[in-house]
Image: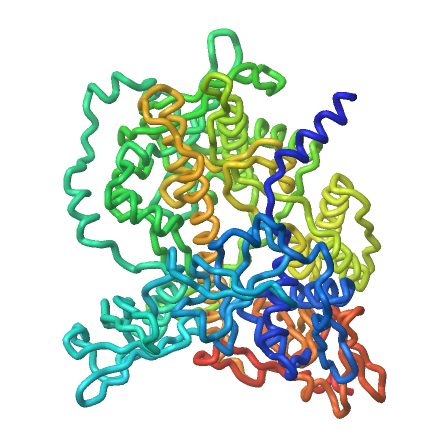
């Protein structure tokens, strides 16, 4: 067998079992169709899934299900489920699975109260009738008993293994002798009974956070207690807090965490310094956004006696303070990430750590974990070292200050900054040659007044200073991952935390090609390597053009989601065989895990790593990362609506970013806000949805509305309660 075939076989054997995004889309769509039953239509399916999938993912799911003969889409958008047949041999679970008394999986609750549970080893989800859901909630990890294997596997939920969420935002309905809590969201589709003794000062109609304390089997309503009465300086402040809590993030830390923090001071003992590589005399500085307070990375540079240069990437040693098993550690693991909303940060670690003790502030000695690279005159890495260090930052640069020094050649440490910039460009060039994708999507920021109300929208373009920091962080992450992958205990590999990114879904690539073609870009995706080259070529062409944001957004959506795992499959988007997250432990829990693993490897502890436990922590971090992204998107939408409330009636140029049977989604070019034009506002005729082409077509005029089309829209309403921006077509576009 050739070396190439051996490698391919090995990669195939080590690739983890997991659903692709297409399979996730199919399953969510299938769940919705089953729940709707005879009422399943395109008009009903899309709004039912809007909180789980993008419009494109719903279309992909429907298309795949129809291709595989699972459904049939008929006239007027009626969707027929084609499951009334004897199951084929490959549909049946294996004898091993059928004979196992109990199975474990994640509950997906339908609107009518039934559930579907995904079980590894079964090609179909297990259907749980409403009467056998037994108080499970959306996303709960559950233990089930399979009771039937006829047309589809059916079962009952025996117990809840782990709640996805136990605290919910909503309001109190206070009666004479008791109170009920009504949740804001569908994750909790029942009211909660709250005893008067558990109101914690809440009054009728107060907005509160309630924690579920007990939910006895057979009881319709759980029992809960008010853990916080929500207050805010203004409605926006309150709503931002509710967005965080609604997505599973606490806005304060338990008292026990603050108690543990009392033992830490900013003093570093001489004994601790003696156990580390002392880098305090080496020129070191940080580069961060102007409003940043948690500086978790710094860069050092010095010339060695042999003429080479040493570049140091220094990362705050959070694991020195966040010790495993403490309340501080448990709270950090639970949050798994900091959440960045337009007007605030919900930190993973308390401020004393994130902004003071761990933050690499200038003119202070700080404990760090470092990767040190020796580079020759051609910027080739001759040697690297991973070590615990102590540093002393000489200067804090904002990105804008560092950029000015790079561009003008004047200012503090100009020679060092310009040399670092040259090295970073060389690193970037090598990465691009390997097939990395250059996503350079502009970041949308709001200008806010003192109350958090948006006054304007600003596009933040990343320049050399931003890219310089990113390039060195990517290098450090890749180096640490390679180091971790090589480590063994005897003949056994040690488990490690990887940041992996799978190849893109061909269905999504085809959809992207169709959209790009409407802007005049004819592209094809024939293999993964060519896909990266095609993306890079296109992204260069669209830079600075009106369609840039739409195509960059769709390109990102066509990619698989990156996640954390102990099973390495590489990182497709970065074209790296090994990659991890090591450089942001103040705001990401996986980085803390990586630091601990390195400590173990470097001999600081004799504790051995349990792979299953590590994988469980990786899974939680991936889940919380997506929840943070949901919260950030929801908060951005809220600020967009706030921004547009005094612009009702205004007309704006836009680009169609989504098409569904009930209308089109349009992103306005100037402010990047997205709203929906309902079909009744598209013109004085009926519009037919053509699924394969993802477009709406006028029944008489044959006028088309396609993804990527340029349109002019009028703002009809911006509803802060419904979180909805309603648009109409401008008069000029109706003619």
Work out whether 353 lies above or below 442: above
Give the side of residue 551 with respect to residue 232, left or right: right
Relative image position of residue 122 (x, y in whole percent) = 60, 54
Work out whether 616 lies above or below 633: above
Dividing the picture into quadrants, the one containing residue 131 is bottom left
Work out whether 4 lies above or below 48: above
Relative image position of residue 353 (x, y in whole percent) = 27, 42
Residue 639 showing in the rendered view:
yes
Residue 408 showing in the rendered view:
no
Residue ID at (48%, 54%)? 101
Name the quarter where the N terminus is drawn: top right
Give the side of residue 607 with respect to residue 471, left or right: left
Residue ID at (18%, 49%)? 256
Residue nearer the viewer, 250 or 383? 250
Which colour assignment does the render follow? rainbow
- The count of marks equals 0
Residue nearer the viewer, 282 or 523? 523
Relative image position of residue 250 (x, y in whole percent) = 31, 59
Residue nearer the viewer, 162 or 47? 162
Give the side of residue 32 with respect to residue 543, left or right: left
Residue ID at (79%, 83%)? 75
Dividing the picture into quadrants, the one containing residue 343 is bottom left
Work out whether 731 lies above or below 457: below
Relative image position of residue 517 (x, y in whole percent) = 81, 60
Give the side of residue 610 with respect to residue 410, left or right: left
Dividing the picture into quadrants, the one containing residue 199 is bottom left
Name the quarter where the C terminus is drawn: bottom right
């Amino acid at each position: 067998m050739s070396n190439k075939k051996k490698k391919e076989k090995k990669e195939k054997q080590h690739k983890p079992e997991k659903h692709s995004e297409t399979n996730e889309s199919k399953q969510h769509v299938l769940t919705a169709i089953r729940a709707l039953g005879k009422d399943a239509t395109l008009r009903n399916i899309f709004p039912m899934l809007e909180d789980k999938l993008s419009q494109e993912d719903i279309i992909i799911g429907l298309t795949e299900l129809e291709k595989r003969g699972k459904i049939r889409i008929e006239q007027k958008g009626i969707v027929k489920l084609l499951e009334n047949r004897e199951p084929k041999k490959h549909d049946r679970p294996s004898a091993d699975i059928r004979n196992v008394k109990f199975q474990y999986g994640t509950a997906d609750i339908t609107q009518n109260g039934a559930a579907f549970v995904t079980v590894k080893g079964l090609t179909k989800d297990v259907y749980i009738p409403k009467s056998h859901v037994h108080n499970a909630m959306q996303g709960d990890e559950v233990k089930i008993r399979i009771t039937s294997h006829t047309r589809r596997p059916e079962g009952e939920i025996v117990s809840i293994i782990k709640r996805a969420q136990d605290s919910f935002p909503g309001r109190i309905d206070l009666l004479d002798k008791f109170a009920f809590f009504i949740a804001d969201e569908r994750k909790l589709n029942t009211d909660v009974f709250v005893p008067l003794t558990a109101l914690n000062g809440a009054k009728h109609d107060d907005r509160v956070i309630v924690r579920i304390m007990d939910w006895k089997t057979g009881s319709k309503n759980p029992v809960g207690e008010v853990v916080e009465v929500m207050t805010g300086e203004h409605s926006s402040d309150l709503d931002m807090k509710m967005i965080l809590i609604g997505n599973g993030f606490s806005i304060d830390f338990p008292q026990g965490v603050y108690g543990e923090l009392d033992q830490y001071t900013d003093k570093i003992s001489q004994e601790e310094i003696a156990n580390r590589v002392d880098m305090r005399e080496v020129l070191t500085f940080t580069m961060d956004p102007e409003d940043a307070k948690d500086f978790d990375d710094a860069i050092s540079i010095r010339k060695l006696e042999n003429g080479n240069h040493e570049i140091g990437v220094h990362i705050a040693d959070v694991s020195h303070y966040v010790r495993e098993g403490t309340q501080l550690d448990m709270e950090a693991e639970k949050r798994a990430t900091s959440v960045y909303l337009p007007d605030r940060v919900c930190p993973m670690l308390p401020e004393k750590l994130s902004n003071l003790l761990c933050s690499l502030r200038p003119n202070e000695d700080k404990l760090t974990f470092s990767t040190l690279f020796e580079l020759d005159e051609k910027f080739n890495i001759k040697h690297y070292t991973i070590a615990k260090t102590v540093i002393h930052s000489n200067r804090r640069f904002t990105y804008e200050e560092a950029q000015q020094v790079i561009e003008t050649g004047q200012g503090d440490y100009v020679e060092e900054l310009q040399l670092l910039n040259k090295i970073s460009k060389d690193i970037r060039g090598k990465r691009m040659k390997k097939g990395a994708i250059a996503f350079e999507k502009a970041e949308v920021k709001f200008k806010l007044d003192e109350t958090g109300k948006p006054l304007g929208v600003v596009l933040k373009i990343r320049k050399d200073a931003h890219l310089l920091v990113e390039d060195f962080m990517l290098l450090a992450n890749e180096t640490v991952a390679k180091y971790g992958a090589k480590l063994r205990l005897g003949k056994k590999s040690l488990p490690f935390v990887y940041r992996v990114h799978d190849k893109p879904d061909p269905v999504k690539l085809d959809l992207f090609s169709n959209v790009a073609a409407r802007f005049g870009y004819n592209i094809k995706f024939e293999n993964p390597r060519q896909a990266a080259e095609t993306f890079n070529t296109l992204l260069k062409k669209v830079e600075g053009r009106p369609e840039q944001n739409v195509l960059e957004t769709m390109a990102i959506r066509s990619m698989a989601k990156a996640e954390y795992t102990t099973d390495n499959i590489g990182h497709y988007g970065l074209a790296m065989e090994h990659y991890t997250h090591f450089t942001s432990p103040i705001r990401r829990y996986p980085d803390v895990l990586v630091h601990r693993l390195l400590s173990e490897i470097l001999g600081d502890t004799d504790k051995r790593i349990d792979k299953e436990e590590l994988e469980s922590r990786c899974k939680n971090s991936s889940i919380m990362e997506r929840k943070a992204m949901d919260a950030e998107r929801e908060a951005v939408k809220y600020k967009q609506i706030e921004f547009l409330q005094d612009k009702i009636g205004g007309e704006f140029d836009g680009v169609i970013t989504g098409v569904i049977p009930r209308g089109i989604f349009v992103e306005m070019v100037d402010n990047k806000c997205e709203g929906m034009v309902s079909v009744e506002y598209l013109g004085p005729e009926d519009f037919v949805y053509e699924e394969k082409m993802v477009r709406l077509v006028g029944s008489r005029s044959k006028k088309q509305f396609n993804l990527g089309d340029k349109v002019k829209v009028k703002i009809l309403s911006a509803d802060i309660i419904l979180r909805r921006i309603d648009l109409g077509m401008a008069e000029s576009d109706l003619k």
